[in-house]
Image (tube, helix red, strand yellow):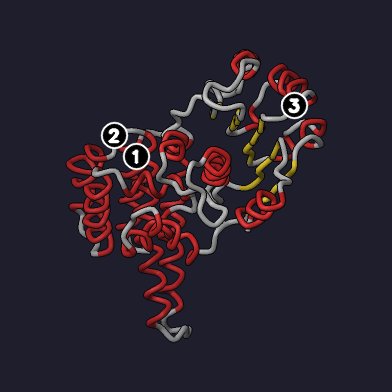
Amino acid sequence: MVMIQLQRSYQQGTIAHAYLFEGEVGTGKKETAIWLAQLLFCQNIQNDAPCNTCHNCLRIKANEHPDVQQIKPDGQTIKVQQIRDLKTEFSKSGVETKKKVFIIESAEKMSAGAANSLLKFLEEPDGQMMAILLTEGKARILPTIQSRCQILHFSNLSRDQFIKELENKGVSQKKAEYLSHLTGDLEKAVEISQDEWFNEAREATDKWFTQLLNKDFQAFVYVQKKVCKVFKEKEQQLLALDLLMLSYQRHFEMLIGGLAVKKDNSYLIQKSVAEIEIIFNGKRKLEANVSFQNVCEQMVWLLLKDR
């Protein structure tokens, strides 16, 4: 595990001045970057790990520590001016200590100018400075930048690990299990769990699913009456289809568990697979900017008709 490797480096005094954390969304890159920054500034280190409760740890977690800077894409890219501003800021002495850390999210989105500017920065590192680059696509990072970083690969968490991490962050076991089916992104799962709107969203999609499963034509009315009112933003609408798909997938798993798959009932399996494909295709249309109401109504028509 990456954290164990970093702990060993800390114990041995071999922490690198630049890291490249590579892995898919939800593999814990950002959380580990914050953890490492906390480790360097923590006022009460315990068992070679940050306490997560001291003043410095809390400020870093809230992105409020003056000597820990976080950079995200400005629009579609990380622009050269963002790196220049960072270099200007870090050319000064640390505000509170001599140590300085910067974290660059989606580092593969650096413009050519930004990447070259960062490269010059890494070529002449300050002994008290640490760079942590996060990426989902290492191949899109300049090889010269890669060569100046220690590259650590992040693998997807198992479902049990994912649930445990959520529980460690205060999410109930039941909700953690539900979220583990919905997303593999730990940060997004925590964000969803803390949103009061999510409970209303779950109730709305659960009722919609029940109507669809029972072939109730009220499911058409429900789209305009409830679904479109609850899911207003594009991200919420995509989540609505994820929730509906999850309900169908669970239904499919229950169906498989309760059937000895024979020719007599194979059509039920095929029907369930077809229903999941309808929702999957609906999500693709929504991503292609077809209106949410049109996507939902078309899905309802396909799901309700005899197959």
Q: Callout 3: few (<14), some (14-19), or many (20+) C-alpha neighbours within 10 Å?
A: few
Q: Is residue 124 visible?
A: yes
**Along the viewing direction, whichever of 233 and 149 lies nearer the viewer:** 149
Identify which amino acid the numbered label 2 is placed on.
Lys
Please tell me which residue is depicted at 50% across the width and 63% down the height of the picture. Answer: 161
Label of residue 157 in the image: none
Q: Which residue is mark 2?
A: 232
Quarter where residue 124 is shown: top right
Separation of residues labelled 3 and 2 (CA atoms) = 47 Å
**Along the viewing direction, whichever of 138 and 208 lies nearer the viewer:** 138
Please indicate whether residue 83 sits to the left or right of residue 56 in the image. right
Q: Which residue is mark 3?
A: 125
- 274 is higher (above) or lower (below) than 118: below
Q: Which residue is mark 1?
A: 236
Identify which amino acid the numbered label 3 is placed on.
Pro
Which mark lies nearer to you, 3 or 1? 3
- CB under 8 Å between discs 2 and 1: yes
**Mark 1 element type:** helix
Coordinates of residue 249 in the picture (x, y in percent)? 41, 64
Quarter where residue 173 is shown: bottom left
Disc on the earlier residue, 3 or 2: 3
Disc on the earlier residue, 3 or 1: 3
Identify which amino acid the numbered label 1 is placed on.
Gln
Screen quadrant of the C terminus: bottom left
Coordinates of residue 86 in the picture (x, y in percent)? 61, 19
**Mark 2 element type:** loop
Q: Callout 1: few (<14), some (14-19), or many (20+) C-alpha neighbours within 10 Å?
A: some
